[in-house]
């Protein structure tokens, strides 16, 4: 049965009391899954009850929000706007609930942060250790994600900050530099590239030569992998990815087993080289600088714990620049 919408006075303010959290979360879940049935299953309600809630929401808004098809649902133009704003509302309410839980537990705040593998394998643990020492009552909620997932988390409001690669699209977000590292090549001691580096020019290899071998890499969507793929294309090569994994730990263990070699930040490579009996080689003939950014929606809207981390990183980056 087609929905009937009542004309709404454009000058009349919509009644905010008629919005409820369950319906908004159901609406978001249904669109994210592309199915009203999937949304209903997530909240443990019948399809009929879910349909009525969405119909009531559309009636209240005065416009259709979903396009209903045999194979699922999608958002109308108006529905896309409601979906985006509903995500923000839900995220803010979840932050409210988390803050209240923190207060009850005696915490002074909550830091919600996403970071990519390069940050985890490099500068971030030491920074968070200093942060925790300075703000011992702040709870830290840290997610290990690829850069693109970190950007989406900040855009949706499920995280306030994300450490991402500088080659990742982050439209609408504010960013600031938070770390610079150098890409190196990690190989087994018995690998031909390690053996060839034993003489003059020891410890270096041309990027073009390195990328001619089987690679262990993160997912192709990862900012690091995209950087390596771009270097390969610049050299007229197709990157030979033999194994794809989700972490630097897995990358290095695959290298240790002889399944391939890996390009990764120097700070992370050094952690594993000695423990796994691997060799790090400097790369030449390509851009090997790896820059990380700290992304946020708006600095002015950050919570006190998030702003404190931003200011700490800014101070440390500024001090490092001044020492060069």
Image (tube, rainbow, N blue to C red):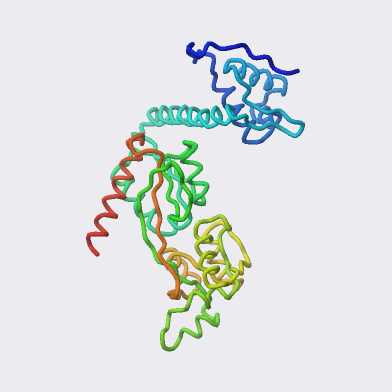
Q: Position of residue 195 (x, y in %)?
A: 51, 84
For residue 229, which quarter of the picture?
bottom right
Work out whether 213 lies above or below 125: below
| Residue placed most toward the observer, 198 or 4 | 4
Q: Position of residue 199 (x, y in %)?
A: 44, 88
Residue 134 shows in this picture: yes
Query: Relative to residue 182, is residue 244 drawn left or right?
Result: right
Work out whether 42 lies above or below 319: above
Residue 274 shows in this picture: no
Work out whether 71 lies above or below 10: below
Placement of the C terminus among the 4 image quadrants:
bottom left
Residue found 46% across the figure and 56% down from its top: 167
Residue found 61% across the figure and 69% down from its top: 240
Q: Position of residue 249 (x, y in %)?
A: 52, 61
Q: Position of residue 160 (x, y in %)?
A: 42, 39
| Residue placed most toward the observer, 122 or 228 | 228
Residue found 56% across the figure and 70% down from its top: 255
Query: Relative to residue 264, is residue 243 drawn left or right?
Result: right
**Residue reaching furthest bottom?**
199
Placement of the N terminus among the 4 image quadrants:
top right
């Amino acid at each position: 049965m087609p929905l009937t919408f009542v004309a709404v006075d454009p000058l009349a303010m919509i009644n905010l009391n008629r919005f409820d959290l369950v319906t908004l979360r159901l609406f978001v879940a249904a669109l994210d899954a592309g199915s009203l049935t999937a949304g209903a299953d997530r909240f443990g309600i019948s399809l009929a009850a879910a349909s009525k809630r969405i119909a009531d929401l559309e009636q209240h808004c005065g416009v259709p929000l979903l396009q209903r098809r045999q194979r699922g649902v999608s958002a109308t133009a108006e529905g896309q706007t409601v979906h985006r704003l509903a995500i923000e509302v839900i995220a803010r309410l979840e932050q409210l609930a988390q803050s209240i839980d923190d207060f009850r537990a005696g915490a002074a705040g909550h830091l919600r942060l996403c970071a990519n593998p390069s940050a985890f394998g490099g500068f971030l643990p030491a920074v968070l250790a200093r942060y925790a020492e300075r703000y011992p009552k702040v709870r830290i909620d840290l997610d290990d994600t690829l850069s693109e997932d970190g950007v989406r988390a900040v855009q949706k409001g499920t995280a306030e900050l994300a450490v991402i690669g500088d080659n990742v699209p982050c439209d609408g977000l504010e960013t600031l530099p938070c770390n610079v590292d150098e890409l190196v090549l990690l190989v087994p001691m018995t690998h031909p590239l390690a053996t060839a580096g034993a003489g003059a020019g020891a410890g270096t290899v041309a990027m073009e030569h390195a990328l001619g071998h089987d690679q262990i890499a993160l997912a192709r969507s990862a900012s690091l992998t995209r950087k390596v793929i771009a270097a390969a294309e610049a050299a007229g090569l197709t990157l030979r990815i033999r194994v794809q994994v989700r972490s630097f730990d897995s990358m290095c263990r695959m290298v240790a087993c002889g399944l391939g070699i890996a390009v990764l930040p120097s700070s992370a490579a050094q952690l594993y080289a000695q423990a796994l009996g691997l060799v790090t080689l400097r790369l030449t003939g390509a851009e090997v600088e790896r820059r990380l950014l700290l992304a946020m929606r708006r600095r002015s809207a950050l919570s006190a714990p998030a702003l404190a981390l931003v200011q700490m990183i800014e101070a440390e980056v500024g001090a490092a620049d001044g020492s060069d």
